[in-house]
Amino acid sequence: MNKSQISWTDTTWSPVTGCTKVSQGCKHCYAEREVTQRWSKNPKSIWYGRAFTDVRCHPEKLEEPLRTKKPKKIFVCPRGDLFHENVPDDFIDSVFGVMWSCLYLRRNCIDGHVFQILTKRPERMQKYLSTNRSETWARHAVHYGGGFEPDGIYDQVLYQSSEPHPRIWLGVSVEDQQIANERIPLLLKTPAALRFISAEPLLGAIDLLCLDDYGLKPKWRNEPGTYNVLEGRWIAAVNDPDFENSSVETDLTKLDWLIVGGESGKNARPMHPEWVRSLRDQCVSTGVPFFFKQWGEWAPNCLCDTKYHHKTIERPPSGLPPPYNRGVMFRCGTKRAGRTLDGVIHDAFPEIAL
């Protein structure tokens, strides 16, 4: 595993590498750019001679979390997607077996690991995790625990895995309202101890307090409505006489963490400050931890010394009404742009389960 430069994690683990594009957020993929420009030309790299679209599984990397002495937040498959269609279920079983083994194999404090899984394929993640794989995970947990059963690891995994792993955080990437509407409901239907979204690159405004319900409403209601994913509350249509204040509290799932960031790289698209402020304010109003990773290549003019500016936005980002005109954002590079929002660094994390 490698120490990560990503500010919301500690280290990365790559049992799967390679991916293919599925939406506009993938258009200028940072991982593909790094592979193409550097690693595919390095004979010592696992990427040597490969295209980024060449999806591969790496059994030799499966035991890496077991060798790490200190508890870490581990980003799983940062340059790939664990739930890519080319990754067999059997291999995903192995990955989950290692994560369960880390929870119960109490050596070198490794029971403290937190695994952060981020996907753009929530439909497969939901299907996979909605099936009972307890026995398979338990067998893999014993295997990667050294072939023995310390503290009855097989029985613990077998019975405990009927509930979500308390230290596996599941997330989906979203870039605008359309993708949020498609992916977040699938995430909320997936068994998980903690759910999060990464809105990076953020390419448009997203309203999480009023998301299209997409099947999240109670099954016994036919009335259309929306869903507040930060509070886990279905909001009935205003013409529904059966609900006081046109809303109903339910036991439906919700998001536990939100990461937001702008795009980097030569062809980076700008992220408007109002999109970020809106998501920050939505989190503040509902008590959901908010993490602002970066502005990316473009930043508000108040953050930049004008002598470094070499290009400004020719037109406002799509969907923004006047008076957002030319000059709102400047291209100054990710380092100069930084990660302060209205003078504050937002780096909140959810609580880690014991």
Image (spheres, rainbow, N blue to C red):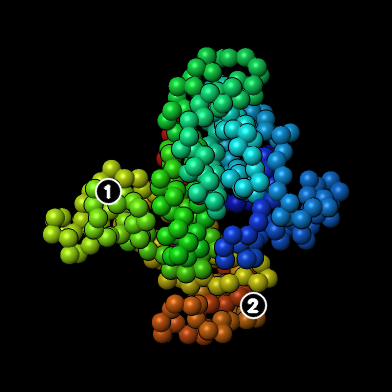
Quadrant including the N terminus: top right
Measured Cα–Cα span from mark 1 to mark 2 = 53 Å
Q: Given the image, on which type of amino acid does mark 2 rest?
A: Tyr
- Give the mark, 1 or 2, whose residue is nearer the N terminus: 1
Q: Residue at x 67, y 33 (%)?
A: 62
Query: Left of 297 or right of it: where is 207?
Result: left
Quadrant housing residue 71:
top right
Query: In this orientation, does residue 52 appear?
Result: yes
Query: In this orientation, does residue 335 appear?
Result: no
Name the disc covering residue 335, or none: none
Q: Nearer the viewer, residue 98 or 57?
A: 57
Label 1 neighbour load within 10 Å: few <14, some 14-19, many 20+: some
Quadrant housing residue 145:
top right
Residue indicated by mark 1: 218
* Secondary element type, mark 2: helix
Residue 328 pos. (x, y %): 50, 80
Residue indicated by mark 2: 308
Mark in the foreground, 1 or 2: 1
Q: Nearer the viewer, residue 202 or 312?
A: 202
Q: Given the image, on which type of amino acid does mark 1 rest?
A: Pro
Quadrant including the C terminus: top left
